[in-house]
Image: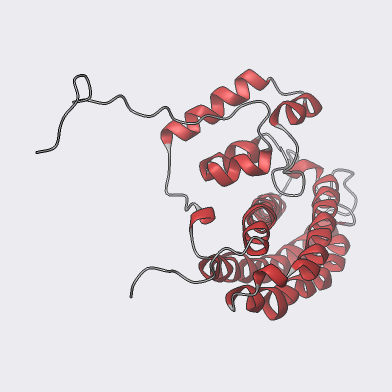
């Protein structure tokens, strides 16, 4: 019969890890995926700027760090259905990125360009119109398509074949292109006036800004998963396939 030591019949629960000021934004979202909407709501860059500590990001953005940590703790307590991709086989993650983000971006961008052209044309005389937005989005499309094709045709097959440790060169190129995506997002947000539609905005104008905000959330989540989960795990030799018995 196993021995039960005095005082150990009801062991105390292990303390739950919590966000701290020195934690880096990208690493926080890896550990706590439910924090993604919190950071996005405060426009904190957890993808391309994910190596910045929480304290530094708050100082730059003028955010009270105690209030932010309280909000993050509340989100962690609430929990959610977020998948911890740092614990899943890499091939599952590459397939998820293809289906959830690559497919979505290919649908989103042409629709946003069409809407932007309509809004700019109909409201051309209004100072608050997003002048130049359609051209900026259209110029970005070839870069986005080429970037996703590099992942689908070069990097993802390497990772899925178990050769992620040898993918340093393509990863370096893709990380630089992620920085370019970040710059393009900032430009689009500026042209679209932070996605805040004026009082005179029509339904299409409002839908355009809502769609742009959704695209931004998707792209930032996409880049975060690659920069802070897929790339480092692949280069470290994480398994591509599940090791569970079939």
| Quarter of the picture holding the N terminus | top left
Q: Is residue 38 visible?
A: yes
Q: Which of 5 and 85 is in front in this view?
A: 5
Q: Nearer the viewer, residue 105 or 210?
A: 105
Q: In this view, does 246 lie to the left or right of 171?
A: left
* Image coordinates for residue 189, horizontal then vertical, percent: 80, 47
Colouring chosen for the image of the structure = secondary structure
Q: In this view, does 131 lie above or below 58?
A: below
Residue at position x 16%, y 29% in the image? 4
Q: Nearer the viewer, residue 5 or 238?
A: 5
Where is residue 100, by image quadrant? bottom right
Tell me how many marks there are: 0
Q: Nearer the viewer, residue 45 or 154?
A: 154
* Image coordinates for residue 163, horizontal then vertical, percent: 65, 75
Q: Is residue 169 left or right of residue 241?
A: right
Q: Is residue 197 visible?
A: no
* Image coordinates for residue 59, horizontal then vertical, percent: 78, 24
Residue at position x 72%, y 52% in the image? 205
Q: Is residue 77 above or below residue 235?
A: above
| Quarter of the picture holding the C terminus | bottom left
Residue at position x 70%, y 81% in the image? 153
* Image coordinates for residue 49, horizontal then vertical, percent: 77, 44
Q: Is residue 241 above or below residue 58?
A: below
Residue furthest left in the image? 1
Q: In this view, does 57 lie to the left or right of 190?
A: left
């Amino acid at each position: 019969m196993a021995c039960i030591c005095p005082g150990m019949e009801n062991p105390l629960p292990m303390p739950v890890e919590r966000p701290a000021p020195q934690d880096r934004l990208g690493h926080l979202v890896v550990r706590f995926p439910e924090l993604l909407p919190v950071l996005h709501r405060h426009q904190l860059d957890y993808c391309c700027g994910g190596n910045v500590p929480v304290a530094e990001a708050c100082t730059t953005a003028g955010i009270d760090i105690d209030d932010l940590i309280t909000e993050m703790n509340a989100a962690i307590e609430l929990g959610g259905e977020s998948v911890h991709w740092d614990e899943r086989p890499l091939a599952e993650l590459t397939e998820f990125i293809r289906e959830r983000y690559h497919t979505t971006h290919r649908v989103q961008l042409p629709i946003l360009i069409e809407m932007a052209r309509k809004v700019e044309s109909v409201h051309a005389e209004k100072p608050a119109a997003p002048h130049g937005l359609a051209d900026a989005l259209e110029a970005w499309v070839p870069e986005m398509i080429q970037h996703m094709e590099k992942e689908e045709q070069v990097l993802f097959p390497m990772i899925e074949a178990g050769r992620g440790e040898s993918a340093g060169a393509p990863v370096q190129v893709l990380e630089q292109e992620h920085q370019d995506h970040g710059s393009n997002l900032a430009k689009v947000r500026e042209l679209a006036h932070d996605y805040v539609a004026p009082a005179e905005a029509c339904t299409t104008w409002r839908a355009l800004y809502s769609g742009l905000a959704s695209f931004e959330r998707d792209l930032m989540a996409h880049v975060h998963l690659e920069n802070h989960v897929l790339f480092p795990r692949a280069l470290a030799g994480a398994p591509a396939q599940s090791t569970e018995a079939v």
